Amino acid sequence: MNVIEIKNLTKNYGKARGVIDVNLEVEQGEIFGFVGPNGAGKSTTIRTLLGLIHPTSGSAEIFGKSCTTNPEVRKEVGYLPSEVFYYDGMRVIDLLRYSASFYKKDCTKRINELAEIMDLDLKKRIDDLSFGNKKKVGIVQGLIHEPKLIILDEPTSGLDPLMQQRFFDLIASENKKGATVFLSSHILREVQKMCERVALIKEGRIIKFEKMSTLQENNFKRIKVEGPSDLDKTIFDMPGVSKVENGGKTATFLFRGDINRVIRKLAQTDVSNLSIDEPDLEEIFMHYYSKDG
Amino acid sequence: MNMVRRELKANARALIIWSVCMFLCVITGMYKFSAYTSGTAATGPSINDLLRTMPTSIKALFGFASFDMATMSGYLALLFIYVELAASIHAALLGAGIIAKEESDKTTEYLMVKPVSRAAIITSKLIAALLNVVVINVVTLVSFLVVVPLFSKGGDVSGEILMMTLSMFIIQLIFLSLGAVLAASMRNPKTSGSVATGILFTAYFVARIADMSNKLKFLNLISPFKYFDLSRMAAGNGLNFGVVLLSLGLVAVLVGLTYITYQKRDLGI
Amino acid sequence: MNMYLHELKSLRKSTVIWTCAMIAIALVYLSLYPAIFSDGAHFKDMLAGYPASIRAVLGVTLESVTTLLGFYSMIIGFVALCGGIQAMNTGMSMLSKETRERTAEFLLVKPVSRAAVVTAKILAALTMFLITDVVYYAGACVIASIVKQSSYSGSLFFMISLTLFFVQLIFFAIGLVVSVFFDRLRSVLPVSLGTVFGCYIVGAFIAAGKDDWARFISPFRYFDYSYIIQNSRYETPYLITGAVIVLVSIATCYFTYARKDIHAVS
């Protein structure tokens, strides 16, 4: 069964566009990436999934049920929101205990484990914590009940590099234990590293929904050629070549298509250095992130 | 100037609502005036005679300790107690809110890093608040001047109305500055509004209790509502100049404290 | 249950403050009763000679204003004003708190239905009012028994005191339903103060006469104390109105809150 199933989801805020006809599935046990420019509709999608807002039409289900009609489904969901706010006057341990009381499980062991990993002082007052430390409270709070689905919205914003690493290790180990992860992030490097499939949303619509490997295969390769002397410009006059940066002896370009054509052309020239790079997600998506992508 | 304009705009809607409410207060109160003056010589003694014989304590229970109820100005004094209370609540909440706003709305990291001194910020806010209070006061004054002649059976009470409204203005100033200094000095400025209102209501009840008996005159010092003797004003004797000066002095002290404490304050996020 | 306890804890401090305030009001006014009694004793005789219209204007059955129950009826209005503000403030901030303090994304993502959240909060508020009123009532009883000049009916004293709880229920319900529709309000206090105080003023002036229709406007006027004292019961039309207001408000609250969109950080 698909852990998350979103079918023809549309949400309008009065006249303003939220999301339009979104279709997504997330399979059991996978790590799924969800990316898009600011204002694209990522938060709207997530909030509809969790039952915080109601769809105008279509459905968003977790484990086959809608969170609005079946709130108990959220027992198996852990959510880390992008901005974290808690009640005044509580200490970290109080909030975590209050959180745990909703899941009818004894989470004490888990609380201590997670606090240890994330370097979180349980006795401190939440009001006194820095932004990054509050974020850590959010992370721990989302994981203490060992949920089967973990939804993360910008999880590492505010965390220092060491904590970011620890956090991803944590997510990876949860995933190994069988949890499904839904990660929404602007840090494409992270998404690339962790996710098997990814969806790109722009202006309310899903414009890409593919396996990471397919994305990379079907996309441009970055080719860098260096010659002993100025390179022949005709090398780059090929279909499939774009974004040529020709600096005399060195040239970089993007190429999509049958790689043999490039090899044959290059074989006809004198080349001193050649590198062919897989594009990273950033390059692939930057293209979509820009207004005319 | 830009800050004053910003604050005025932010408070505009609330100001309109409060102004309408003040007007409704005045109309509602005047509507019942005729009921209080019914009773002619033919059917029996008027309520005025009744009240003259009523003991102070019982009269105080009804809130009109020493007013001559049958006359318009006496009744006005009674009505004014409630009008003043409403205007004071507005002033206290305004004063506290306008100072506490930056911290409760979390805009401190925006405003406080601009090239303006904290003193300039406070000044702009207080000016905006003062303008709001003046508007409320003028609305009340005009409401009375317009509505009273509709119900009055003759006799011009404009002078008394003016005096009472002026005294109300000073009381508004006192509570405005009280709210401001509380918000500037409290560790958690979000609760300053509640504290200011709490103090205000305590002062109100103290005033009503002081009405009850001549032996409790010392209580007049505690409650700003008793700084001005409304019955004196109803009798046409105007404001006590010394009290006016002292009150303005109190306002000045509170405002000064606001500046000083806000300057020293560690601004929370 | 956990939400209920959490809400109770957060209401703890304000409950203490309000209870003290209400007892203080009763204490101060009741302590003046003996003086009133002696002042009023001879005055009562004189009042009998005045026209009924004037007696009606003063709004209180003059024969009883110098009895403990009659005097208590007068001052319960002030206590009810206090209780009303407490109730409306609680009602208004209860649900909007999650939006205002942006903790909605914590609480509403937990495996509990919106209805469960509302129920926990309402029960916590009701508990708070009950505690406040019971402690107040105990205090008032003690003070009354000290200042009394003659024996009075304990059950009538209770009935008069109970109106406090009814008034609180009504204002709480109104506050709840308003907050569901206006949850972005930065500051709850001006609205709750304004509404409760407005009802109080309207009650004091417009309903001072026997205008029955006007009495429906202000919850403070739903209870005519002279009627209660004379008949040992409440007036049914007003009880029903009050109950209807409370039930409709709470039902609307449940219905609307379940269907609401909870928006991101505002």
Image (cartoon, coloured by chain):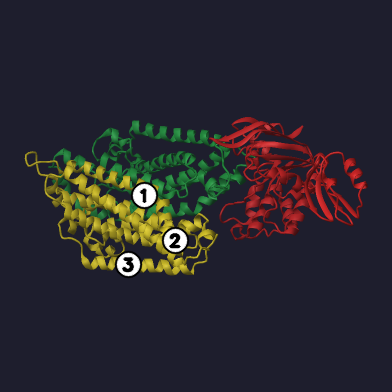
Chain colours: A red, B yellow, C green
Q: Could you tell me if the residues under marks 3 and 1 are in contact, i.e. CB atoms within 8 Å?
A: no
- Image spot of residue A183 (x, y percent): 72, 44
Whether residue B197 is visible, yes or no, is no
Label placed on residue B250: 3
Label placed on residue B15: 1
Label 1's element?
helix
Q: Could you tell me if the residues under marks 3 and 2 are in contact, i.e. CB atoms within 8 Å?
A: no
Residue B226 position by quadrant: bottom left
Q: Could you tell me if the residues under marks 1 and 2 are in contact, i.e. CB atoms within 8 Å?
A: no
Q: For this view, does C180 lie left or right of residue A118?
A: left
Number of residue marks: 3
N-term mark: 3 or 2: 2
- Image spot of residue B190 (x, y percent): 48, 56
Q: For this view, does B34 lie left or right of residue A51?
A: left
Q: Type of residue at label 3? A: Leu
Q: Which residue is mark 2?
A: B183
Label 3's element?
helix
